[in-house]
Amino acid sequence: MHVGRSYRVVEFAMWSRRSVVYMVLLSLLAIALFLLPPIQGFALPWQVVVMLGTTVSLVAGFKNSQVLGRSAEGLQAFAQIAATSRMLAGFCRGFCEPQVAKILIHRHIAWLTALRFGLRRPMPWESMSRRANIEYRRRYHILEDTTNLNAELARLAPEAAKVSDGTRPEIDLLSRQAEAFNALFRAGSLPPQIYVELTKLLRDCHDQQARCDRIKNNPYPRQYAIVSAMLVWCFCTFLPFGVVALFSEMGIGIWLAVPFSTLIGWMYMSLDQVGESTSNPFEGNANDVPISQICRDLEIELRTLLGESEIPKPLPAINGIAT
Amino acid sequence: MHVGRSYRVVEFAMWSRRSVVYMVLLSLLAIALFLLPPIQGFALPWQVVVMLGTTVSLVAGFKNSQVLGRSAEGLQAFAQIAATSRMLAGFCRGFCEPQVAKILIHRHIAWLTALRFGLRRPMPWESMSRRANIEYRRRYHILEDTTNLNAELARLAPEAAKVSDGTRPEIDLLSRQAEAFNALFRAGSLPPQIYVELTKLLRDCHDQQARCDRIKNNPYPRQYAIVSAMLVWCFCTFLPFGVVALFSEMGIGIWLAVPFSTLIGWMYMSLDQVGESTSNPFEGNANDVPISQICRDLEIELRTLLGESEIPKPLPAINGIAT
Amino acid sequence: MHVGRSYRVVEFAMWSRRSVVYMVLLSLLAIALFLLPPIQGFALPWQVVVMLGTTVSLVAGFKNSQVLGRSAEGLQAFAQIAATSRMLAGFCRGFCEPQVAKILIHRHIAWLTALRFGLRRPMPWESMSRRANIEYRRRYHILEDTTNLNAELARLAPEAAKVSDGTRPEIDLLSRQAEAFNALFRAGSLPPQIYVELTKLLRDCHDQQARCDRIKNNPYPRQYAIVSAMLVWCFCTFLPFGVVALFSEMGIGIWLAVPFSTLIGWMYMSLDQVGESTSNPFEGNANDVPISQICRDLEIELRTLLGESEIPKPLPAINGIAT
Amino acid sequence: MHVGRSYRVVEFAMWSRRSVVYMVLLSLLAIALFLLPPIQGFALPWQVVVMLGTTVSLVAGFKNSQVLGRSAEGLQAFAQIAATSRMLAGFCRGFCEPQVAKILIHRHIAWLTALRFGLRRPMPWESMSRRANIEYRRRYHILEDTTNLNAELARLAPEAAKVSDGTRPEIDLLSRQAEAFNALFRAGSLPPQIYVELTKLLRDCHDQQARCDRIKNNPYPRQYAIVSAMLVWCFCTFLPFGVVALFSEMGIGIWLAVPFSTLIGWMYMSLDQVGESTSNPFEGNANDVPISQICRDLEIELRTLLGESEIPKPLPAINGIAT
Amino acid sequence: MHVGRSYRVVEFAMWSRRSVVYMVLLSLLAIALFLLPPIQGFALPWQVVVMLGTTVSLVAGFKNSQVLGRSAEGLQAFAQIAATSRMLAGFCRGFCEPQVAKILIHRHIAWLTALRFGLRRPMPWESMSRRANIEYRRRYHILEDTTNLNAELARLAPEAAKVSDGTRPEIDLLSRQAEAFNALFRAGSLPPQIYVELTKLLRDCHDQQARCDRIKNNPYPRQYAIVSAMLVWCFCTFLPFGVVALFSEMGIGIWLAVPFSTLIGWMYMSLDQVGESTSNPFEGNANDVPISQICRDLEIELRTLLGESEIPKPLPAINGIAT
């Protein structure tokens, strides 16, 4: 997530420069076709371009609103996880033996860790592998790229070895947490009220995890993505051929069609590209939910409360990008 | 649900080729009417076409947003079911005799099975029987088409024979599950707190089932569907007759009206067709909620926790389509 | 609720034929004014018509989305009621004497009955009394039109006579149900946990009833309805006078203005009329929440579980309309 | 809230006649400027007017949807309050001495009374003091205008004298209700389960009260209101100067610009004025949540259950306006 | 939050005068380019400007609706906090020793204090440091600018010294509150039911705090902000060059292009600027959630109930701005 003042226009233009290049070349082609003999005067009727432009705006608005909803839901899930984690740690510290509390809280942190590694795994539809994003990614750093789930878990949970073999370590850890609570309850070491509260918190962990999984496992519907991409492409491709006619009456001014089409086409393409890059809020894009940072902050908070001494450092935003 | 990178344009065009053919024929007709004697120069005023275009965009946007809401709600219901199932299995394993726990969890899986078969039954308004979808369906595989509820239930629940006779086996199974919990509670084999938690989870199963039923049993309002379809049809039919006049000034260029009208008409028709194919999220379309896969994954997860050995395989996405 | 494949265009056109007639007459008037001497050449500027068209689309989109929200909320309330009813019946059967359970469940069915009769009562703003809807209503059947609350209640609840005298029998029945639960609890015949669960379910009945009442008692805001109706009327009335000028350049083609204006005007009017007919989801329109059917299905389900023999039949959809 | 069939057009036109007068005068000015010497032929370019028109539609749509959300939330809060009140009365009657129950229920009604008086107090941004609304208000009657909180409370709660002195009597009453429940619980006169239920209901009263306060105390954001008002004013002021040019080609027909501009300008102004009058759902406008009526109906219902004899009458809608 | 009748147009114009100046200069430049020799007659095609205008309206509508959602969510969180605080104080006063209750309630007020100081800290993306806002801020007063967290906490919580050293005093205070409740419960001084209720309320404090943090820590997505800003800038920059051609036919009237472009450009820029200034609801803007006032009102209310004598004064709105 970009947490600086704003993207700079240059930075943004660099990121989306492929659209710019495409539009410049197309505009030159449009002028060439218009000016050069074989089909001199060729241009597309501007009225059709306008109609497409309105539709593209509406469709892009629709997409952006849906996609932002996914992103906002990811943030909500992690906000909820933060609240839940604090409550859970409070109960553990308040009603369990310090040693037991430490194990329980460490397992909770292990769950957070496994969850965030799970959410970082690449999916076929994610845009992280697009060239613009690979380039931009050099400007910041994703924790999960340079660390290793097994190693992180080993520090936290005794059952790490078993857990990290499975396909879904985060589910396994929650299941083990439940077993631990159940055992404490059966042993009578937890007042029933506290057990019930812990159960509610665990339920919340399951719910938020299912929510994150839902966003992670189900792309923004591909059928909408393709219609929307085709419309944008169509509009931007037709644009210079329509613009060229509008400027042609200005004599030499026809060359103004190049910057003009480019600027406009670039903005509409950016509208779509921005939507595309927001649609998968956990992949590690510059616009994504900063799950590494949120989990690290929670880890620091919980371990400080446990009075531990070896506490990891907060993750700073690099070049304004929190991850 | 399509879980690949994206639909390919060719694939998409094949799926919606009926619109393309319709637009090509209509465009040729428009040119013929424009060029040939009896009513030479016939064209529709473009301004009207533009106004219709704006309305079609708005109406399609409205429809797509409503229809995507149905689909998203289907996904939410199943995400919630996943979280509930995990909690339920945890309590059963933690507080019941292994044999009892196994019966309870198997009955829960039986419920999932009955639910997914129920959600796959065809409804009059579903679009699975449209030719484009029948063709496309050959590319992937729907589990419920080749298996049988009775057989699947027989493997899971002792009461299978009775249950699968009824009209709503999924409701019957939940009702039997409730009876089993009640009996355990009355027999004092469940701590009251646990009974209360199981009750909440059962309530959640009822709620999510009622939610899925609501989406399954009530189509996207037919009165909106028809207004929207008529508007799109009207716009696309008028389009070539309006375009032809715009291109007529270009001499030979009038033939450009054919690809042009076709491309634009095809996109607007696709906008509507895509909405139509998203509106029933459980019928088994390429864009639907992958309920077979979600249930299968849950079954694997729950049975692994029970330590069973004969566990079904995960359902892979076929040609990028998870079902 | 229409639960067939789709409305047929002819059927829809019949329903909205008053708009068609209005548009045809208006178009003929427009041509007459344009062609005949006194104010020959009279036409309205098309640009204004277009601007109104865009506004009408936006306003109609706004209205339809609000109105569909009302309808969707009605469906949600009844889906929730179904889940609640099943839970409630389960607890009654599991923890009460069979005789008591039967009384409680019958009273619950009596509540459903009183609720649906209450929701069917006519309100001043409902569109059931419009001629188009009266005509269309002959094609299907509304249970509450031919049956009688008193008679239905008499079959179900011992207190029927007292209850059906009051102004709000559904509230009275819920209140008596609460008293019955309280009495059982005070008498120690219900475990506290079960009493608490029954209380939650009763709360849910109260909530869903208040939600349905809210939709029933408060129309789609009349101030929005009138602005929207005026805009549509204005646009459709101006339309032929604008279209006539566009077509006038085509010589004999001017007569094309008639079908053209009619088709377009009809679609915009339908957009509004469809919204109007969706806005009151309980009055018994062809597009409304099928509350009779939902309640009947629940009654069948609950009485079958009670092992009763005289069970009413399901209500089939008539001509594709479930009520 | 208008609960009749519909506003009549004449009634609506009277209410918004100031816009009509403004538009007529402006149109005459536009014609004068166009026809009379000094700057003969003066007109604004219509294309700019159209662009503003589209923007105004979008901005008005945005405003109306936000404002309707406020109104709908007000209705939801009171629907929830109705459900809660019924539950609360049920518990009081079921588990307290009749005398105590009566005091508790009367205090609840006192709270409803204090709440509705609080919500009727005027706020600087409310539109009740606009001339159009003052005039229209003569057609109906707001209970709180002619009654007095102190007097009404005196009939209901023993602590009335103390309470009505404070700044927020409704908060004070809820606080006293909580104390009463706590005292009953500490005295062992309430089973713990019932106490917990009463606590939940009290929590709900607090929540709904906070929700109403939020709507009452925070206007529709003034910064949006002013941008929206400026856009509408700008558009409507430019409109006749644009329309005059369109009609000027019709010779004598130029005078048609007057009714035409007036009609259109009036509708756009109404769109905004209607939004403005809906934005504060508790002030007592013709479109507001009928809180007096809802509270009165609840009072009648609860006191009838208590078997009281002196019960107030329901509040009828006057001229179709429920308040 | 502006709680007056409305912003005055002059006030609003002063605030956004930079846009006005920009538009005036640009319009003069446009006229100069159009009239003066080198590229006499230079103008941009108006059709492109219109298309951009529609897109800008849609994009601004999208942004404003998202941004208003953030603001509304902030208000909801604080409404919820108010309800929770009242319930919490009720339980403390009802079931704890007066001395203990006082400590607990004071700690709760301390939490509110720490929360509001936390929400006032500046973030890089907030618009408080823009010149227009700095100027406007002179008209009102933000409590947190002139007071000090340490001093305020010292008056309230015994642990103030320790707490205010930490990075997140609000989290620390909630954690201490939980410990206090736990200790009371373990000591048997709280009935279990009350402990459970306090736990729920604490959970709610955590949830609302996490919600506020989410809004505070995550800006309105910067990628959307920049696309939207670029579009508005582009449109407003092109506008005068398009308008100039429309007015050029009016001879001397060309100078009308200056006020005209300025007025329109200013409104579109305001639309964006207003969105920008609403997007961070806690920074202390004139349009933000009045958290100081809400917390002060709660403090007064809770301390009055405790019977304290030294109670702070309510915060009046200054120049109509509540903060």
Image: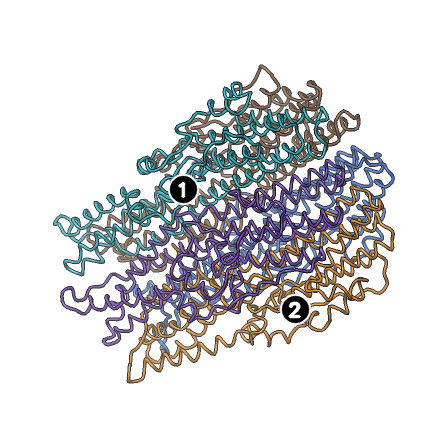
Chain colours: A blue, B orange, C purple, D cyan, E brown
Chain containing the residue with disc 1: D
- The amino acid sitting under disc 1 is Asn
Q: What residue is at 55 percent from the left and 46 percent from the top? A: C164
Tag shown at residue D287:
1
Residue wearing tag 2: B320
Say which residue appears at 38% left-offset and 43% top-offset: D320
The image shows residue D58 at horizontal and vertical percentages of 40, 51
Quadrant housing residue A101: top right
Q: Is residue B248 left or right of residue E2?
A: left
Q: Residues within 10 Å of mark 2 (few under 14, many from 20)?
A: some
Tell me: residue C237, above or below residue C202.
below
Name the amino acid, label 2. Answer: Gly
User: Which chain is indicated by disc 2?
Assistant: B
The foreground one among B296 and A309 is B296
Q: Residue furthest bottom?
A: B37
Between residue D61 and residue B73, name the one nearer to us: B73
How far, Cα to Cα, is label 2 from label 1? 52 Å
**Residue C206 coordinates in the image, percent (x, y):** 59, 43
Residue count near mark 1 (Cα–Cα under 10 Å), binned few <14, some 14–19, many ≥20: many
Q: Outermost residue toward the left?
A: D37
Say if labels 2 and 1 share a chain: no
Q: Secondary structure at mark 2?
A: loop
**Foreground: disc 2 or disc 1:** 1
Q: In the displayed orientation, state which residue is furthest to the top.
A: E309
The spot of residue A136 in percent (x, y) is: 60, 54
